[in-house]
């Protein structure tokens, strides 16, 4: 019998290995940008076509490569960063394993141009499917240009798994921002399909944050700066009022490398405890510098998950640094130890402490209790101090309070209510619940509506009820029903961050079917020509911004289809919020439309829209 086990050919082995490093075009963007940073570039340009599927090109003015190095750079595990095992624990560069270019060359067509300053001519190399197709001298400026074309052209199954262009473009923008954020002194630019999305000049970290995340953070950043013998922590965190429902603007860097760490994120969240709502997330861009020997960055193919030698001490330092920053900038409450001038006028301060008063004080048992060693536990028996309970005599219960307490103790009845779990229009053998026509409606706390029904009364939550109404109305649009839209008298411009701009472009077709009329208006800016009739006039810009935040929240937490996430986000944003006073006609319309729904008792997310109080429950409450 012949032997069965054989070595894989290099090109097949490279394609298999490339799946760990190059999962989509954004993976190549990350690797190529990091290589340019390692080359000492001061200016890096990223060019993308067809969301990276047709072209990803990175051009830098770094040190460049010799002809031999250019050829060797595409070999697997060929690196200039490691000579022995000890070097692995002193890594401060972004790349070091020699896998990136080899993986890219295995799944794409690659063109490389490079030249060192001391060389007269540069080198041009063309590689396809890990095979060198052409190598020749070329005239080129100092630096390197690597172009990855037609990614996964030789692995069609993997190419079919790529998402739509807007989705892939969002991933590319995310990777670009992470690298550009880590190196604010380097100039970066991103051009997609011939249109420049980012143009970042070298500057300070704060300038880079504002350019990348939006001008809204300009006056809302708090400086974090802590230096210790073990590590240094620096960066910025947002004031509590910048907290959002999504984790989008949260960045951790360890030795300038972006990482994901739920553990360290918890440290920041605990520093914000009781300052922001429990379901909100603060903005932060934090850098941790420490000895590379204290951290292992080689535990994940993308190097975004790392291991610390002592996680607990890192957690404590991060939490302390953020807390100190918030307190230092008067974000958290602090005690004021400045002496009040009026204290100086008090009798006890103004009078001198004479020798006679000193002798009298030292002779007292109270003074001896505190001044002698191991006597503090005898304070009650030895001093003239009264027991603390003596200062608080037990009050006698008289009048209405005692009568109420007795009534509560003797009462055996229980308060009961129920939430409707089935459609009141199709209840079984029980009496069907129906609204009493022309009955008066009452609004409580600008949040709830009390509506009489034939079985008692119901307490409607106005926002949750409106969510159900809007959900069924918008869901009908997908079945061909038209949506009413109102044109804006004055079109409203909405500037967005680059990430949100890419996301909104992806959602535009579906938003247009829901009654919005939104058009692209230059770079990262949109103009609202019309909006659904449900949106309050003058509130369109805020509605779009908050709808995007809610959409990202659904994307992070729950696995819905894109259309369902958009539908729920729009419904949540357009629904009447608690605190809004409603006229009688508005309450009547809301109540009637709720019971006209196919499923009026719950919201799309499963919360009850109303609570029903039945007559027999109320009679039992009053002992009838």
Image (tube, rainbow, N blue to C red):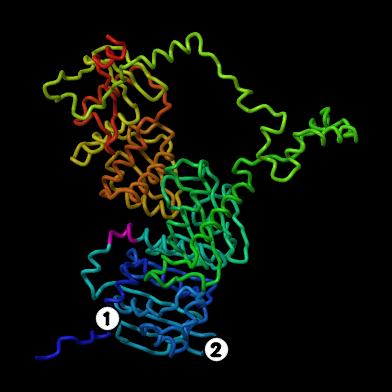
- The quadrant of the image that shows the N terminus is bottom left
Q: Give the Cα distance between marks 1 and 2.
A: 36 Å
Q: Is residue 35 above or below residue 271?
A: below
For the residue carrying disc 1, how many other residues have a C-alpha within 10 Å: few (<14), some (14-19), or many (20+)? few
Chain part drawn in magenta: 163-168
Q: Are marks 1 and 2 in contact (CB under 8 Å)?
A: no
Q: Tag 1's secondary structure?
A: helix
Tell me the residue at 29%/76% (across/down).
Answer: 107
Q: Residue furthest left?
A: 1
For the residue carrying disc 2, how many other residues have a C-alpha within 10 Å: few (<14), some (14-19), or many (20+)? few
The mark tally for this picture is 2
Q: Which residue is mark 1?
A: 13
Main secondary structure type of the part rendered in magenta: helix
Indicate the quadrant where residue 4 lies.
Answer: bottom left
Is residue 273 shown in magenta? no
Q: Position of residue 523 (x, y in %)?
A: 44, 54
Indicate the quadrant where residue 318 lies.
Answer: bottom right
Question: Looking at this view, is 431 or 541 the one in front?
Answer: 431
Q: Tag 2's secondary structure?
A: loop
Q: Position of residue 324 (x, y in %)?
A: 61, 51
Q: Is residue 409 above or below residue 476?
A: above
**359 lies left or right of 258:** right
Tell me the residue at 52%/41% (across/down).
Answer: 275
Q: Which mark is residue 118?
A: 2
Question: Looking at this view, is 69 or 539 the one in front?
Answer: 69
Q: Is residue 101 above or below residue 453?
A: below
Q: Residue furthest right?
A: 355
- The quadrant of the image that shows the C terminus is top left
Labels 1, 2: front one: 1
Q: Position of residue 360 (x, y in %)?
A: 85, 32
Name which of mark 1 and mark 2 comes first in the sequence: 1
Question: Looking at this view, is 278 or 251 the one in front?
Answer: 278
């Amino acid at each position: 019998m012949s032997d069965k086990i054989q070595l894989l050919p290099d090109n097949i082995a490279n394609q298999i290995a490339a799946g760990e490093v190059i999962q989509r075009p954004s993976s190549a963007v990350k690797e190529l940008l990091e290589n340019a940073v390692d080359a000492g570039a001061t200016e890096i340009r990223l060019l993308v076509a067809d969301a990276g599927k047709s072209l990803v090109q990175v051009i830098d003015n770094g040190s460049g490569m010799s002809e031999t190095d250019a050829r060797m750079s595409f070999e697997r595990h060929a690196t200039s960063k490691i000579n022995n095992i000890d070097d692995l624990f002193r890594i401060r560069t972004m790349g070091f394993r020699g896998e990136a270019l080899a993986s890219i060359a295995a799944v794409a067509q690659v063109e490389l141009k490079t030249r060192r300053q001391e060389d007269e001519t540069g080198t041009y190399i063309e590689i396809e499917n890990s095979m060198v197709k052409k190598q020749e001298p070329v005239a080129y400026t100092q630096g390197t240009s690597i172009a990855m074309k037609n990614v996964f052209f030789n692995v069609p199954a993997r190419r079919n798994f790529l998402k739509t262009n807007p989705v892939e473009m969002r991933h590319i923008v995310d990777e670009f921002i992470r690298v550009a954020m880590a190196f604010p002194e380097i100039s970066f630019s991103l051009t997609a399909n011939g249109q420049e999305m980012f143009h970042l000049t070298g500057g300070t970290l704060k300038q880079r944050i504002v350019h990348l995340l939006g001008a809204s953070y300009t006056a809302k950043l708090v400086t974090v700066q802590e230096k210790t013998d073990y590590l240094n922590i620096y960066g910025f965190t947002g004031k509590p009022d910048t907290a959002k429902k999504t984790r989008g603007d949260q960045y951790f860097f360890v030795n300038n490398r972006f990482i994901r760490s739920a553990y360290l994120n918890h440290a920041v969240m605990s520093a914000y405890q009781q300052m922001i709502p429990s379901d909100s997330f603060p903005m932060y861009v934090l850098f941790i510098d420490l000895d590379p020997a204290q951290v292992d960055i080689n535990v994940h193919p993308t190097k975004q998950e790392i291991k610390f030698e002592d996680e607990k001490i890192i957690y404590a330092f991060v939490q302390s640094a953020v807390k100190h920053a918030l307190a230092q900038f008067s974000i958290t409450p602090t005690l004021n130890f400045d002496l009040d001038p009026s204290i100086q006028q008090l009798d006890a301060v103004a009078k001198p402490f004479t020798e006679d008063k000193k002798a009298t004080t030292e002779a007292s048992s109270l003074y001896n209790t505190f001044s002698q060693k191991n006597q503090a536990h005898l304070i009650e028996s030895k001093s003239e101090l009264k027991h603390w309970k003596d200062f608080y005599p037990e009050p006698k219960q008289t009048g209405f309070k005692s009568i109420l307490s007795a009534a509560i103790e003797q009462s055996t009845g229980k308060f009961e209510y129920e939430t409707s779990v089935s459609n009141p229009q199709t209840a079984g053998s029980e009496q069907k619940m129906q609204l009493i026509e022309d009955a008066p409606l009452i609004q409580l706390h600008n949040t709830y509506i009390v509506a009489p029904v034939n079985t008692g009364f119901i307490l409607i939550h106005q926002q949750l009820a409106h969510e159900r109404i809007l959900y069924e109305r918008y869901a009908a649009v997908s079945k061909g029903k038209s949506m009413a839209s109102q044109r804006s008298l004055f079109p409203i411009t909405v500037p967005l961050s680059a990430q949100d701009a890419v996301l909104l472009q992806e959602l535009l077709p579906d938003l247009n079917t829901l009654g919005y009329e939104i058009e692209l208006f230059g770079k990262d800016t949109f103009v609202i020509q019309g909006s659904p009739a449900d949106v309050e006039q003058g509130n369109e810009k805020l509605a779009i911004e908050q709808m995007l935040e809610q959409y990202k929240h659904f994307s992070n937490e729950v696995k819905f289809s894109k259309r369902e996430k958009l539908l729920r986000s729009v419904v949540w944003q357009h629904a009447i919020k608690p605190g809004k006073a409603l006229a009688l006609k508005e309450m009547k319309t809301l109540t009637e439309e709720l019971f006209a729904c196919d499923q009026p008792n719950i919201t799309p997310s499963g919360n009850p829209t109303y609570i029903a109080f039945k007559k027999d429950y109320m009679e039992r409450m009053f002992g009838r």
